Image (cartoon, grey):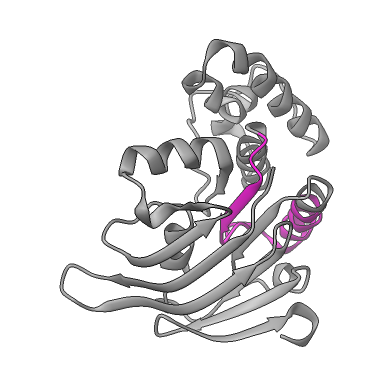
Amino acid sequence: MTLDLTLKALAVTSDRGRRLLDVDRLEVPAGSLIGVRGPSGAGKSTLLYALAGLLEGLTGSVHWGDTDLAALTPGARAVFRARRIGLIFQDFLLFDELGALGNASLAAQFRPRKDRTDIVARAASHLSRLGVPVDRRTVATFSGGERQRVAIARALANDAGILLADEPTASLHREAADQLIEDLVALAREGGKTMVAVSHDGALLARMDRVLTVEDGRLVSDARAEAA
């Protein structure tokens, strides 16, 4: 099940007192695909990490449905993240000694035994859908596009309603990036998931419902993708 997102008076400050992010209000209906763009250092990744509950010391609120991540303990945020959020990183963050299925079904290692079979089955299904072979090879031998598809299958294996992606196409050549965009957008829409993707890739941003522009830690634009 996916969730609405509402930010109110969200602020993130560095240890040295520098304001890294300042968002007065943002509302995202469940099932929306949101792109986030802006120059390097603008606060895009900080926003994404705040949405994932990965930051300490923020003020304001980050509501996913009725749950305010900013009000939870680190342990409670980790539980929410494990059950509700799929994360896709630019650098893949795979275990090179494992194969595609081992990486994609990693969440099964941290869930109750009764949930593990379903997680592994979903991981295998998504790998098949994404055209990634499940064989004896480790991901160390995979191309960048294959590795990113494994990362997407991992994010989807837990059936999370929220997908957060940080520059998912940045490490790929154009043909691989375009195919990945098709796969990612189709999987998000078919699953009715809320997706927030930080990206400099105009081809990815054009497929979103809305595109947010962040500059100097502030949200300066919120536009429909075709008008962004």
| 137 or 112, nearer to the observer | 112
Residue 18 position in % (x across, y down): 23, 78
Give the residue displayed 58% in from the left and 56% down from the top: 165
Give the residue displayed 51% in from the left and 59% down from the top: 63
In the picture, residue 201 is in which quadrant? bottom right
User: As drawn, is 37 to the left or to the right of 125?
Assistant: left
Residue 126 position in % (x across, y down): 75, 33
**In the rendered structure, which segment of residues is drawn in magenta?**
159-185
Vertical relation: 69 (above or below) 138 = below
Vertical relation: 181 (above or below) 81 = below
Residue 14 position in % (x across, y down): 23, 70
Residue 200 position in % (x across, y down): 60, 73
Q: Residue 95 in magenta?
A: no
Q: Residue 171 in magenta?
A: yes
Count of numbered badges drawn on the protein: 0
The quarter of the image holding the N terminus is top right
User: As drawn, is 61 to the left or to the right of 13?
Assistant: right
| 181 or 97, nearer to the observer | 181
In the picture, residue 194 is in which quadrant? bottom right
Asked whether residue 97 appears in the rendered view, the answer is yes
User: As drawn, is 136 to the left or to the right of 176?
Assistant: left
